Every structure is written in structure tokens, then in C-alpha cells.
Image (cartoon, coloured by chain):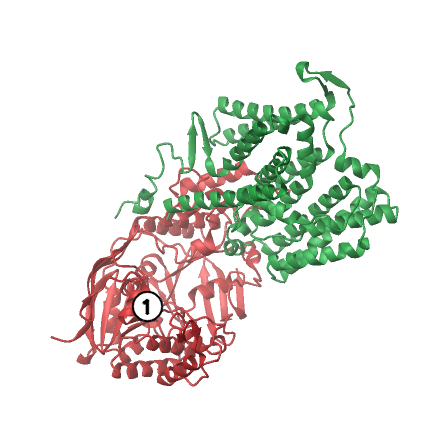
């Protein structure tokens, strides 16, 4: 029998209304690099959170054996004590502290309650050499790039006597050179006997580095592939990730496509935190009346950034490019301009950016369009009620009345409130960012029906989604976005999950 | 899973009773009371009853009611502006100093330069507005936290007060200003006997009746319009009962005041301000935007609300209201002094929070802030009537503030535990 460092068996994790993981099993050999692949939302991150104790023992079903012992982690601290360290996609460093301080945060080199700075900086220096980072340990983390920050995270993990290192999308924000360095480092760590679990969307990197790959789809383990066989290709992984069944989850729709409404040319957006990094690079796309267009891309591809930068420059700096509305060039400087031009954007994060959770349904629906509901600055509350109640009925928002507080509704009903809010602005173009995220199957069907109706009313709809089956089932045409570039445009008939995934993982040359 | 009813939807079911009442409501016969929203009024009623008993009824004597109104008027005016700022998620620590500096400006204009009082008051209001614009600019457009800007303002405007006044009080004020702050309506229509209650001013009683009639008519129109739109309204007996209760309350206060020295002018001013700002907060587009900004700033930005402009104007508004309070305070003392308005900002902030504002913003009512201010006023007044030393008054006010906010946090946590 092989020497396995980790066994996860029959892991099931449910959230209210959603089963995120179902009987997932994962075995990792000691000293290997094990990749976990799956679409966005397949359950990879949830599985890693179960493993690292973010979801404590008892909140899931199944058993975890690590290093031959049954684990009952009550929190991250417990899993770290056992030797499991997770490095999240969003780095957890304090930018105003030095590299050395970050490395030993919560684990300070101290004697009698006072920090021993010589020991701190000396040991930090040794760890930095191990990860190949040539920086002074007293440098502020804010002053080094993202790639180097990633290395600081790894140094921090090494300082904790790590046995199993979990990396969630470690190269998502890195350029090619930094990525290559990171992958080399992981190989070095493997040779030192540290086991790595890596979650990544970059299949070429995975094929390059992994010893075995476990594929997860819809919260279930699909298969584990051994790289030693030498027969695993990107296509093989993709077909495992996407599966093949596309059942009747989508309402039938006969598109009636008309004139062009919106055209975007050479749209380039830079990151506000790293103004020299292009988040969207010379993207061009076009939307027509009555057409539902999909925008596919992996996490970090720049989908939301593209949408928000178009919607009144609510994201990004150094934005350039041209936008044409019905053939006429327009300049959208803020949200008010966008709304006036008939562009609506329903955010992917409705709780943070979409809704005022402490207000009721009617005030949320009316919030963008108070001008239409008021005279001389005074709101006609009865009209507001009538409008909101109309939406409650037509959108089938399940709530006792439109005076119910939005924060207490389920995800699907909250999403219907967001859609109502934007539909009431009577837009020509609706950009829907992850319109069914965190929503149950039944409510999804309703949202799809609403999207079809919007198209039938002659609106152009751009749907951003991480779920490829959703895009294939809903859209008339699909753009793919990879690392900020439009890498493909496929009509419905030609689009398959494999082809989309191929374009979505296309690297830049 | 093909059904359109999702588990999450069903989950909402058991938390509501058969009539779809959300949690946190108390059922009393046909009346349903939202504890979180009504708690403050119930507390106010209990405090009034408590001190009436403790003072053997002295609290509700005509002269004392008049005193409570006049003594707290400037804090209540500040609380109106403060609640709007707190709803938007900001704070204003400078209002005490702004009260002082605007009072000083009014005094210098009227006393030193002999400017006619209507013009002087107008200039003072403009000065208040400019002060608000100054602070609003740094907060809204420059992006400095309001805590810092107004903390600086607290020092700046106190310094300006001392400079303007040359470190001494300036007075006396013209009669008109003193009447506004301290005076009462004339007995235009003579007195009428009210049996065992003695004589009372007819004009004051008439104003009270007109106010009640206006309130009843407005409520009736609202109710009819809502019913016309097919919205649910209170059943008629409950509606009449609520109006009657409000009418009795208003009349009780008015009768007491009419028995003493008629209506204080500041009460008339205050009533108009409360009415106007309640409408502004609830029914105007601008008011809605204040709630939207405080409720979820990012969502407000993405809804096309001009957040910066909203924040700027609520600070301008605060400056104007602070200048009104400054004039009234100076007029009441009949001089503008260097220490005027000391710690008023804390009383105004406390009034807003006792009155149900949320620390995170997005929640609060003008009437709530007024009630919060009156609660503190009644505690102040009642405890001084029973001869409590001032340190004990401070102690009680501190406990009341903490308890009010603790209650708010507690009810919210319970509501949050029910929801996801």
C-alpha cells in the first residue's frame, strides 16, 4: 500500500438550501503535488475549507485522516498545529507590516513577552532564502509585488513546520515569470518532502507540475488521474471537469435578434491597485436587440472588471477604448450617464453591491428610478408601492409584502429584487453578472425565464457566468475572456463546453 | 428539484405566523406593535410616568412642561440635523462650536454693528451654511472621515468664537430675538375658563386644535390613498383610536402650556422643523438618498446616487440648523458667550442614538431623535426637581444611552439570527 498523508472520505457539506459537497473523497500521497480541478463553484474551495478547519469538525459529514490520525479540527489553528497550511487566493498579509513581521504574525519570536527582533529578522532571512526571495526582511510588504508577496506567504507557511501546503489559485494574479518561479519552488519543496495540494484553473501549469489530479464536479469527486501514465492531456481534464449531461434545466427560447445596440471597441482597463497591470486588454464586443450574449471566463479573467468599467467606470483606472450606443459614440463617465443611456448592471455580489439589505423591497426597487416616481423632489409613495407590488407579482418574489426587509429574503428572491430594480429603469442593455450565483435550481429556472422575456422585449442581455452549462443553455452567442482578452466568439450552435473551456484557458502569447 | 419553490423560500415559512408577521412584533388585541421601532416611545412614556410619581406630579405642572421645551429646544434642533448625518453613516462633533460661533456672529452683527435683526439672522444662517459647506467639502469631496473633519471643526470654530468675541460675552440682544428664544405667543384672543383647571389662553388652545385637525386630515388622506391603491391599512376603529390617542396627548400638553404663559415660540419653530424634516426624510427623493447612502454605500454608488453631493448637503443643512440653535441659545442667555454650546454635540449625538439610530447608519427617524432628546431632557429636569446631584444625572444619562444602543444591537442580533 502506498504511503498516503491524507485521506478524506465521504465528505458532505450542506449550506442552507444548497449541498456544496456530496460524498467527496480525496487521497493524497506523501510528498506529491496533487492538483484539484473543477469549474468555478464545483466545490474545490469548500473542500479545502473543510480540510483546514474553516468549517469546524461537526459542521460536515465524513472523516478526515491526516498523517494516520483522525482529525477533529475546531478551527484554522488546529489544522496548522497538525501541519496543514492553506494559502488563499486573496493573500492574507498585512501590507503595512514588514516581511519578517508578516512571516511570524501570530507566531512571534519572543522571549518574556517581548519580541526578539534579531531572531525574527534572522530567521525570516533564512526562510526567504529557502523560497528564493531576495528581499530585506524589514521591507514593508506593501512595497513588494504580488508575486513576491505570494513567496512571503509560502515562507510564512514554512515557518510553521508545514507538512501539507494547500495553495488556492496561487498563480492567478502572477505574470508568467513569477508563475514559473513559484512552480519551481513547489517542485523544490516537494523534493524536501512537503506535500502540496494546488487548486488552479491553469491546466497547462497543472500538467506541468502535478503528480496526480483529482477532478471535482457539482460537489462530487469525479476521478483521480495519475500523471505518471503520461496520457493526461488538457482535453482529458476538461472533459472530466465539464461532464456531458445538459438536461432540461433551461426554458425553451426562440431568439428574435435585431439591430446592434451596443458596441465596445479596444476596451482596456488597468487595475487600481497595480496601475501598470492590464485587467482588460483591447476587448471588443457587440450586443444586439433581443439577443442574449454570454461572457465566459475563469475566475480572474476580467469579466466583472470589464462589465463594471463599462458601467460608468465603477472599476479600474487608465480606461481607454470606445463605446457606441445604437451606432453613436458615447462617453459614460459615471453611473448616472450609464442609466440615462439605458445600460443596467446587476452585480455578482448582490449583498455587498446590489441591495440595501436593511430596507424593504419597494425602496430597493425604486432606488435607481426615484426621479420617475417623484414630482418636485417628493416621492409618490403610493405609486412606488404600486410599481413594487407589480414586480412582486410578475417576478414572483416570495415575500408577505413589498414592505418586507430585503435582508431576510432568500438568495433567489433577493436576485429578483435586484433584477426588478434594473428592469424598472427600462434599460436597452442589461449586464447580468452571475445572475444565478447561490440560487437554487427552481429559482434559477425562473431567472432564466425572466432573462428570455427581457430579450423578447427587445433588450440586449449580456450574461456573465462561471457555469458553462448555464451559458450554453441560455445564450445565443458567447464570448470567451482569458486574462483580460476576448479569445473567442462562438454562436450557440458551435459552442460546446470543451470548446469554451479551450478558449477560456488560452494563454497570451 | 423541479418545483419552483426552493428550500430557502420554504425556510422563511416557520419564522412567520399565519398572518405573515415578522418576528419582533408584539400583538395587543388588534394592534400590532413593532418593538424595535416603538420601544423608544414606550420607554419615553415610562420615564415620564416614573418622574411624575417621583416628583409628586411637579414634572407635569404647566410651568415645568414649558421649561422642558425651552431648555432643550436647541439640543432638539441639533438632533434633527444630527440624525440625518448619522443615517448617512457620518458624525458631526463640531456642532457645539458652530452653535457658539454663529451665536457670536449674530451678536456682533446686532450689538456691535447695529444690523437690523432680520438681516442679521439671515446672515447668521448663511454663515452656518458656509461652515457646513466647508466641512462637507472635506468630508464628501476630499474623502477625510467626518470624525476627523468635525473634530478639527470643533477646535477651529471654538477658536473662531473666541476671536470674534474677543474672549468676552456680547449682549444684550434685541427684543425680537429674545422673544423667539425665550418668549411666548401673545394672548390674542383672551382667556377661557377650563373649570377646575383654571384659565387658559384661547389662541394656544386654538392652535392645538388646528394642529390636531391637520394631523387627522393628513392621516385620513394618506389612509384613503393607500386604500385606493389596494394597500393594507389599519382597520377603522384602530385608526380612530390611534388618532384619538395622539390628539389627547397633544391637547394635554397644549392645555398645560395654555394655562401657564401660552405657547413658547421655540415650540412653534420646533414643531415646524420636526414636521418639515420628517417629511423630508420619509417622502423626499433627497431623504431617500440619505437612507440609501447609509444603508449600503456601494449599492448606492452602483445605483447612480450622487453620494458625494448627498453627504455635502447634509453637512450644509447641519450648519444651518446649528446656526438656528446658536441664535436661540444666545438669545435665551441674552448674550453670546465664549463657552456657549460646550458639549452640545454629545447631547445631540446621544439623542439620535437613544432615538433608535444605528451606529452603522441607514436607520433612524427624526421623531425618534426628538424623543431621544426629550428622554434626556426629562431625566435632567426630573432629577433636578427631586434634587439629585449633577454627577448622578450624568450617571443615569450614560446608562440610558448605553442601554438604548444595547437594546438596538440585541434586537438586531435576534432578527439577524432568524435570517440567513
Q: Where is residue B80 in the image (x, y as percent from the top left)?
A: 63, 43
- Crowding at mark 1 (Cα within 10 Å: few <14, some 14-19, many 20+): many
Task: Determine the residue located farthest toward the left in the rendered image.
Answer: A1
Residue bearing the label numbered 1: A500
Q: Mark 1 lies on which chain?
A: A
- Relative to A17, say whether A63 is above or below: below
Name of the residue lying farthest toward the top = B195
- Is residue A459 in view from this perspective? yes
* Image point (74%, 23%), residue name: B203
Q: Nearer the viewer, residue A504 or B335?
A: B335
**Left/right of residue B406 with respect to residue B279 in the rendered view:** left
* Image-quadrant location for residue B374: top right
Residue B251 x, y percent position in the rendering: 63, 24
Q: Is residue A92 above or below residue A448?
A: below
For the point 34% across and 57% down, the residue is A474
Left-right relation of A383 to A417: right
Amino acid at each position: 500500500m502506498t504511503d498516503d498523508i491524507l485521506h478524506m472520505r465521504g465528505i458532505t457539506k450542506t449550506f442552507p438550501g444548497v449541498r456544496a459537497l456530496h460524498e467527496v473523497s480525496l487521497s493524497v500521497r506523501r510528498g506529491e503535488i496533487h492538483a484539484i480541478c473543477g469549474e468555478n463553484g464545483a466545490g474545490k474551495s469548500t473542500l479545502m475549507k473543510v480540510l483546514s478547519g474553516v468549517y469546524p469538525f461537526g459542521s460536515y459529514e465524513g472523516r478526515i485522516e491526516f498523517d494516520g490520525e483522525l482529525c477533529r479540527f475546531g478551527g484554522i489553528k488546529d489544522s496548522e498545529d497538525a501541519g496543514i497550511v492553506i494559502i488563499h487566493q486573496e493573500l492574507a498579509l498585512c501590507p503595512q507590516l514588514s516581511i519578517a513581521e508578516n512571516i511570524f504574525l501570530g507566531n512571534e519570536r519572543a522571549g518574556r513577552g517581548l519580541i526578539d527582533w534579531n531572531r525574527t529578522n534572522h530567521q525570516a532571512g533564512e526562510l526567504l532564502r529557502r523560497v528564493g526571495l531576495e528581499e530585506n526582511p524589514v521591507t514593508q510588504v506593501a512595497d513588494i509585488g504580488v508575486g513576491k508577496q505570494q513567496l512571503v506567504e509560502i515562507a510564512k507557511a514554512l515557518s510553521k513546520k508545514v507538512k501539507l501546503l494547500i495553495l488556492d489559485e496561487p498563480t492567478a494574479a502572477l505574470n508568467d515569470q513569477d508563475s514559473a518561479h513559484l512552480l519551481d519552488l513547489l517542485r523544490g519543496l516537494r523534493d524536501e518532502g512537503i506535500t502540496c495540494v494546488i487548486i488552479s484553473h491553469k491546466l497547462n501549469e497543472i500538467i506541468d507540475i502535478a503528480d496526480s489530479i483529482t477532478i471535482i464536479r457539482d460537489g462530487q469527486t469525479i476521478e483521480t488521474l495519475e500523471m505518471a501514465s503520461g496520457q493526461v492531456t488538457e482535453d482529458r481534464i476538461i472533459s472530466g471537469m465539464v461532464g456531458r449531461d445538459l438536461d432540461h434545466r433551461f426554458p425553451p427560447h426562440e431568439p428574435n435578434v435585431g439591430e446592434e445596440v451596443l458596441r465596445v471597441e479596444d476596451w482596456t482597463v488597468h487595475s487600481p491597485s497595480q496601475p501598470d497591470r492590464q485587467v482588460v486588454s483591447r476587448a471588443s464586443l457587440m450586443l444586439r436587440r433581443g439577443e442574449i450574449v454570454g461572457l465566459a471566463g475563469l475566475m480572474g479573467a476580467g469579466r466583472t472588471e470589464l462589465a463594471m468599467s463599462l458601467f460608468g467606470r465603477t472599476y479600474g483606472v487608465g480606461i481607454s477604448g470606445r463605446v457606441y450606443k445604437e451606432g453613436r459614440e458615447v462617453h459614460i463617465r459615471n453611473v448616472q450617464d450609464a442609466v440615462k443611456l439605458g445600460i443596467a448592471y446587476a452585480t455578482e455580489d448582490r449583498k455587498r453591491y446590489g441591495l440595501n439589505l436593511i430596507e424593504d423591497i419597494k425602496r430597493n426597487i425604486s432606488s435607481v428610478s426615484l426621479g420617475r416616481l417623484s414630482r418636485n423632489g417628493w416621492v409618490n409613495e403610493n405609486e412606488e408601492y404600486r410599481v413594487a407590488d407589480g414586480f412582486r407579482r410578475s417576478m414572483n418574489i416570495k415575500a408577505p409584502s413589498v414592505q418586507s426587509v430585503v435582508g431576510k429574503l432568500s438568495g433567489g428572491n433577493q436576485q429578483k429584487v435586484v433584477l426588478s430594480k434594473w428592469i424598472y429603469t427600462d434599460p436597452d442593455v442589461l449586464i447580468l453578472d452571475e445572475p444565478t450565483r447561490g440560487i437554487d435550481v427552481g429559482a434559477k429556472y425562473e431567472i432564466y425565464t425572466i432573462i428570455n422575456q427581457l430579450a423578447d422585449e427587445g433588450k440586449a442581455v449580456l450574461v456573465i457566468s462561471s457555469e458553462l452549462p448555464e451559458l450554453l443553455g441560455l445564450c445565443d452567442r458567447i464570448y470567451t475572456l482569458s486574462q483580460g482578452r476576448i479569445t473567442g466568439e462562438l454562436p450557440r450552435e458551435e459552442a460546446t463546453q470543451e470548446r469554451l473551456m479551450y478558449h477560456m484557458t488560452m494563454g497570451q502569447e | 428539484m423541479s418545483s419552483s419553490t426552493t428550500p430557502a423560500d420554504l425556510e422563511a415559512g416557520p419564522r412567520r405566523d399565519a398572518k405573515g408577521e415578522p418576528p419582533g412584533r408584539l400583538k395587543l388585541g388588534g394592534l400590532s406593535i413593532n418593538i424595535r421601532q416603538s420601544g423608544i416611545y414606550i420607554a419615553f412614556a415610562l420615564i415620564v410616568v416614573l418622574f411624575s410619581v417621583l416628583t409628586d406630579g411637579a414634572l407635569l405642572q404647566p410651568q415645568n412642561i414649558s421649561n422642558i421645551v425651552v431648555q432643550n429646544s436647541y439640543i432638539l434642533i441639533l438632533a434633527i440635523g444630527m440624525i440625518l448625518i448619522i443615517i448617512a453613516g457620518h458624525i458631526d462633533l463640531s456642532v457645539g462650536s458652530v452653535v457658539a460661533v454663529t451665536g457670536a456672529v449674530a451678536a456682533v452683527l446686532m450689538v456691535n454693528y447695529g444690523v437690523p435683526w432680520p438681516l442679521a439672522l439671515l446672515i447668521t444662517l448663511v454663515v452656518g451654511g458656509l461652515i457646513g459647506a466647508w466641512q462637507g467639502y472635506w468630508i464628501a469631496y476630499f474623502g477625510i472621515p467626518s470624525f476627523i473633519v468635525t473634530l478639527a471643526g470643533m477646535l477651529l470654530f471654538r477658536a473662531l468664537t473666541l476671536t470674534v468675541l474677543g474672549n468676552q460675552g456680547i449682549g444684550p440682544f434685541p427684543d425680537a430675538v429674545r422673544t423667539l428664544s425665550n418668549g411666548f405667543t401673545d394672548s390674542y384672543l383672551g382667556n377661557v375658563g377650563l373649570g377646575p383647571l383654571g384659565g387658559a389662553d384661547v389662541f394656544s388652545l386654538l392652535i392645538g386644535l388646528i394642529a390636531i385637525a391637520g394631523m387627522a386630515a393628513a392621516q385620513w388622506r394618506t389612509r384613503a390613498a393607500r386604500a385606493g391603491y389596494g394597500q393594507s391599512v389599519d382597520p377603522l376603529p384602530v385608526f380612530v383610536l390611534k388618532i384619538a390617542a395622539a390628539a389627547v396627548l397633544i391637547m394635554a400638553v397644549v392645555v398645560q402650556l395654555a394655562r401657564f404663559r401660552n405657547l413658547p415660540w421655540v415650540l412653534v419653530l420646533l414643531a415646524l422643523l420636526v414636521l418639515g424634516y420628517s417629511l423630508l426624510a420619509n417622502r423626499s427623493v433627497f431623504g431617500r438618498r440619505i437612507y440609501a447612502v447609509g444603508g449600503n454605500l456601494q449599492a448606492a454608488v452602483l445605483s447612480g446616487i450622487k453620494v458625494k453631493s448627498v453627504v455635502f448637503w447634509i453637512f450644509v443643512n447641519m450648519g444651518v440648523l446649528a446656526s438656528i440653535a446658536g441664535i436661540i441659545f444666545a438669545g435665551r442667555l441674552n448674550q453670546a458667550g465664549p463657552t456657549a454650546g460646550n458639549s452640545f454635540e454629545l447631547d445631540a449625538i446621544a439623542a439620535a442614538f437613544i432615538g433608535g439610530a444605528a451606529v452603522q447608519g441607514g436607520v433612524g427617524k427624526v421623531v425618534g431623535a426628538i424623543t431621544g432628546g426629550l428622554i434626556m431632557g426629562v431625566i435632567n429636569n426630573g432629577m433636578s426637581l427631586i434634587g439629585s446631584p449633577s454627577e448622578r444625572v450624568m450617571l443615569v444619562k450614560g446608562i440610558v444611552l448605553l442601554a438604548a444602543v444595547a437594546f438596538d444591537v440585541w434586537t438586531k442580533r435576534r432578527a439577524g439570527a432568524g435570517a440567513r
